[in-house]
Image (cartoon, helix red, strand yellow):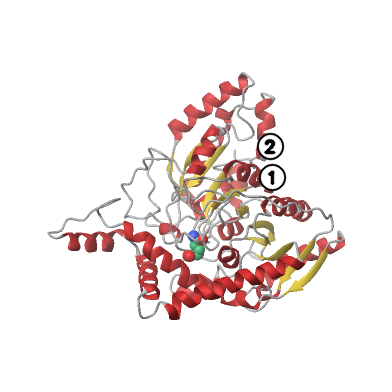
Amino acid sequence: MAEKIPSISKINELFQNKEMKPSELFEQVYETASYTESVLHAHLELFYDEGLKLSKESDKRYKKNESLGLLDGIPIAIKDNINIYGYKTTCSSKMLSNYVSPYDATVVTSLKKAGTIFTGKTNLDEFAMGSSTENSAYGPTKNPWNPDFVPGGSSGGSAAVVSAGSAVASLGSDTGGSIRQPASFCGVVGFKPTYGTVSRYGLIAFASSLDQIGPITNTVDDTRIIFNEIQGYDSKDATSITPVYTKLENKKIKVGILKELMQEGVSNESQNEVNKVVNQLREKGHDVTEISLPLTEMALSVYYLIAPAECSANLSRFDGVRYGIREDASTSYEMMNKTRSVGFGEEVKKRILLGTYALSAGYFDEYYGRALKVRSKIITDFKTAFDKVDFILSPTTPTPAFGFGEKTKNPLEMYLSDLCTIPANLAGLPAISIPTGLSENNLPLSVQIMGKPCSDYSLIDFAESIEEMVEFNSSPNLLKENSES
Ligand code: GLN
């Protein structure tokens, strides 16, 4: 009896008017999970008992008209690289297969205070390295629109659960596109906030200068509601900022189409979605022009030096001593060696090697140092561009979802699927992906909007106007098949 889940505001209205109880909604999403999970494998763990208990407490609050706000009683799934006290955080790695978190991530504390109910932990590419969730040590997640296709990654589980209706929303993490790309492949909304606006405390670090937590939701308004709850300064995160959000005064919006993401390497189907939106924006009287940022063509290369470099440092803490598994051996060196050989998968090892190489004494300047220089230039170029336009529009991904195994043989092909999303991470910009249509083979396509730092709320407002314009109302086959039965 799967039904498309209403928006968070609508659910809250149903709760307030006593037309539905949080525990009923929890049972509904859990029931959906109980049949979708056998196909999708999107959750690594489901929290049924605690979820039900907490949703009943929420029932009581609504009964007494003492609800904690819009998120009270809303079932939300959490990517399994974000810590929840007392539960495992595996990062989809064998290395952390036995790691139970001794504390809550700040985003988790905020959501708990707001009364949300956690449905469980979602699958990802090991340590968030990948674009298809095929790198999980616990097996891949499937795409709810067609289980022969990947859900994207690394937050593939978080995108699939929202698309399949086994959670109202989820949290993901985005280092090079891992919220937006899977959101796009699964036909839902994915938002990477301005770097520093959402605390990373309690997110297992991949590449700290790029990592950002953000929501995956059914609607742009749901994104606004969750972002509102999780954003803000946190003294526990050294890179946290006190955001001063910019507002858009002008009704006529200036939009730049990024030329470098509308050419060879990006499919016609993906480009057409942008063109469709551009036509509608022009009809509404907005000012749309083409802009060129030539250095964005180097973003992928820059990312694949900076991200592995940072990951090689961050993952050195998994040494068999402090966290996770330990292999037996007669010397400590051998123990670390064995633990890391057994604990990490192929892709993670590849990135550690790449990063260690790029940081090594003889090559530091040539690779890592140079990548940092180009990164600063990319940041400056975006700054200049945002003097002329309010937002930058592009496809979210070069193609719709691809099939299992299609890109695993060729890592460069896989890396290319983040072509459009990586620039926003390098420059710390907020960026949102919204579904706009379906491909020829019935898979979702999206557009991405990037804004200047701290324009998060106006970016969300603009994205909402596009969401209304394109009226994307399709839902995955999985949902349809089950609602017909
Ligand atoms: N797919 C990119 C990578 O593998 C981005 C991952 C991410 O954003 N976590 O590095």
Q: Position of residue 156 (x, y in %)?
A: 51, 55
Element class at badge 2 = helix
Q: Position of residue 307 (x, y in %)?
A: 46, 66
Say the numbered circle drawn on residue 419.
none
Relative to residue 463, is residue 145 drawn left or right? left
Tell whether label 2 touches label 1 (CB within 8 Å). yes
Say the numbered circle drawn on residue 221.
1
- Alpha carbon distance from label 1 to label 2: 8 Å
Q: Position of residue 221 (x, y in %)?
A: 69, 45
Q: Position of residue 39 (x, y in %)?
A: 48, 50
Element class at badge 1 = helix
Relative depth, front residue between 414 and 312: 312
Relative depth, front residue between 135 and 88: 88
Relative to residue 51, is residue 287 drawn left or right? right
Relative to residue 293, is residue 330 drawn left or right? left
Three-letter residue code for mark 1: Asp
Residue at the disc numbered 2: 9
Q: Residues within 10 Å of mark 2 (few under 14, many from 20)?
A: some
Taking the spot 51% from the left edge, 61% from the top edge, the residue there is 210
Can you tell me whether the CB of the residue at mark 1 lies under 8 Å from the nearest atom of ligand 1? no
Three-letter residue code for mark 2: Ser
Q: Residues within 10 Å of mark 1 (few under 14, many from 20)?
A: some
